[in-house]
Image (cartoon, rainbow, N blue to C red):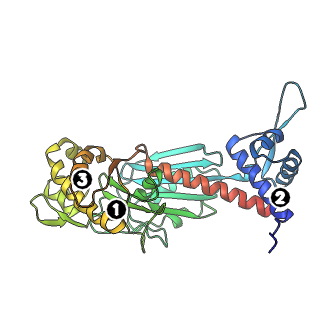
Amino acid sequence: MAPVKPTLELLSSLSSEHILRALMQAERATRAELAGFTGLSKPTVSESVRRLSEAGAVIDTGERTTGRGRVGTYYALGPTSGRALVVSLAPSGLVAEAVDAYGDVVARVVADVPPTGVEGALRDVAAQVAEGPFRLAVVSAADPVDRETGRLVELPDLPFLLGALDAPAVLADLVDGPVVVDNDVNWAARAEDAGRDFAYLYLGEGLGLAVVSDGEVRRGHAGLAGEIAHVLTTGPDGSAMRLTDVFAALGLRRAGTTAIDVPKLLAGLESHAALARALAGVLSAVVALVNPRAVRVGGPWGAAILPALADVVAATPRAVPIEPATVTDEPALTAARASALEQLRDAIVAAARQRT
């Protein structure tokens, strides 16, 4: 069978995509520079820029090259390229960012978590960074997330209860496109460059685990994969107990809550041996079920427990490397921002394809 030749329409669409993605990286460029960036011929670039300009996807910035030779016109993405909303909901506070197609955070607002309900606060911080409707939104939440609806799920003994928050509904009048919501530990795992198969253990006021298999975060049937607080493990006295109850037995909970008292934990090195045994018991189950290459450990007290945990895991029948997380500054927000940028750029290309 003779190979099918691409149509002129397909070639034109691909050329336009190359131009748009080059401008997303360079922010502005002349047609000669775009030819150099993309490897396309100058006539092809000129035709693509003409069509994209007529569609409003690319604009003449009004800037011109200087010096000898032919004067060049600088082009940039059009004002309709829009922005993406990125939100983090965590015990430390709410963060909302507006991200443009160049990857720049053009607005950022941080707010405290209100004592009762976060719906109003979520909408307020999102509205503060809005400049017209967002094309899409990505939300990281420190609670389990239903993978079908994007609503947060209330489970027993959660330290950070946001309630059955419906982020897509709350943000509906601020976002024209999709609202993607996922658990913060899943986002933090996506920030790591640890290969195609690993587990990410988060240790903070709450506990969480993400499983990355074949390069994808596995969320489970209802989006609740990795909720390890209720996994049975070895308690301080050698008896079987839920992982969350180990902290109660060691007196490491904040008064009146199930949240882990991180400052107290970090000050009490004598509890690390018991905690390492309990966590190693949970990781033994993870290793048996999903066979990760390694376990990355992050969170406020992950580095403190890592040496003791690595020693205990090394003595188990199926030991795996226990490694420190490499992204420690806002890892969940970092990955959510990267995902929002990728989706925004894809949306810009798709919209331009429809108009040209």
Q: Can you identify the residue that label 2 sits on?
A: 12
Residue contact at pointers 3 and 2, CB within 8 angstroms: no
Q: Quadrant of residue 135?
A: bottom right
Residue for point 74% across, 40% down = 28
- Picture coordinates of residue 97, whole percent (x, y): 54, 48
* SS under mark 3: helix
Q: Can you identify the residue that label 3 sits on?
A: 314
Quadrant containing the N terminus in the rendered view? bottom right
Rounded to the nearest angstrom, the CA distance separating label 1 from label 2 is: 51 Å
Quadrant containing the C terminus in the rendered view? bottom right
Sequence-wise, which precedes: disc 3 or disc 1? Answer: 1
Determine if residue 43 is in view. Answer: yes
- Binning the other alpha carbons within 10 Å of mark 1 as few (below 14), some (14 to 19) or many (20 upward) gives many
Q: Which residue type carries mark 1?
A: Leu
Seen in the picture, residue 324 relative to 288 is either above or below; the reply is above
- Picture coordinates of residue 297, whole percent (x, y): 33, 50
Q: Which residue type carries mark 2?
A: Ser
* SS under mark 2: helix
Label placed on residue 161: 1
62, 18: nearer the viewer: 18
| Foreground label between 3 and 1 | 3
Rounded to the nearest angstrom, the CA distance separating label 3 from label 1 is: 35 Å
Sequence-wise, which precedes: disc 3 or disc 2? Answer: 2
Label placed on residue 324: none
20 horizontally vs 69: left or right: left
